[in-house]
Image (cartoon, rainbow, N blue to C red):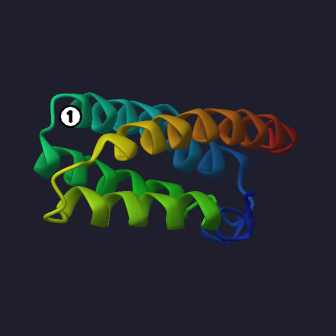
Amino acid sequence: EYNLEYLLMVSGGDPVMLEELSSHILADAPIILEDALKAAEEQNWDLTANQLHKAKSQLKIFGTDSLVSRVIDLELQAKSEILDKTHLFADLSHVLSETRRIFLLISNELNKYK
């Protein structure tokens, strides 16, 4: 579900750097996905795609390849010309729930490095 190797590499294993790199993403990525969900609810597909693009970049640092792949698919759907995007809202809601669940696991694991 996640792989912290990249994060550990770029932080050099330094607990302060690790905290600095991870804390913002752990806080911000779910908010960005919530904003994407709100934009999708309002059928503002450009904003939905933009927010998903931001989230994708943040999720990559934690090696959440499955989530990143799903976010990429949702971003492409938001950008597509398909008019019926009702499934996109449900899929995005699920991705947000999964992100929160995985981020809790990541937070618990990162506590080991403090």
User: Between residues 47 and 108, which one lies in front from this camera angle?
Assistant: 47
Name which residue type carries label 1: Ala
Residue pictured at 83% horizontal, 43% vertical: 109
Give how far across and how far down residue 73 sits, in percent. 41, 65
Screen quadrant of the C terminus: top right
Instruction: Locate residue 14, reporting x and y percent.
Output: 71, 55
* In the depicted structure, whether residue 52 falls above or below residue 34: below
Q: Can you give x and y, in whole percent of width and height, for residue 92 in the image?
A: 43, 42
Reading the image, the residue beneath label 1 is 39
Residue 75 in the figure: left or right of residue 82: right
Q: Position of residue 86 (x, y in %)?
A: 31, 40
Corner quadrant of residue 71: bottom left
60 relative to 51, above or below: below
- Identify which residue is drawn at 74% across, 64% down: 3
Left/right placement of residue 48 relative to residue 1 reads: left
The answer to whether 107 is drawn above or below residue 52 in the figure is: above
Which corner quadrant holds the N terminus?
A: bottom right
* Mark 1 surroundings: few (<14), some (14-19) or many (≥20) residues within 10 A: some
Total count of labels: 1
Determine if residue 43 is in view. Answer: yes
Question: Quarter of the image holding residue 75?
Answer: bottom left
Query: What's the residue at 26%, 28% (across, down)?
Result: 38
Q: Find numbered disc 1 in the image and state the secondary structure of the residue it sits on.
A: helix
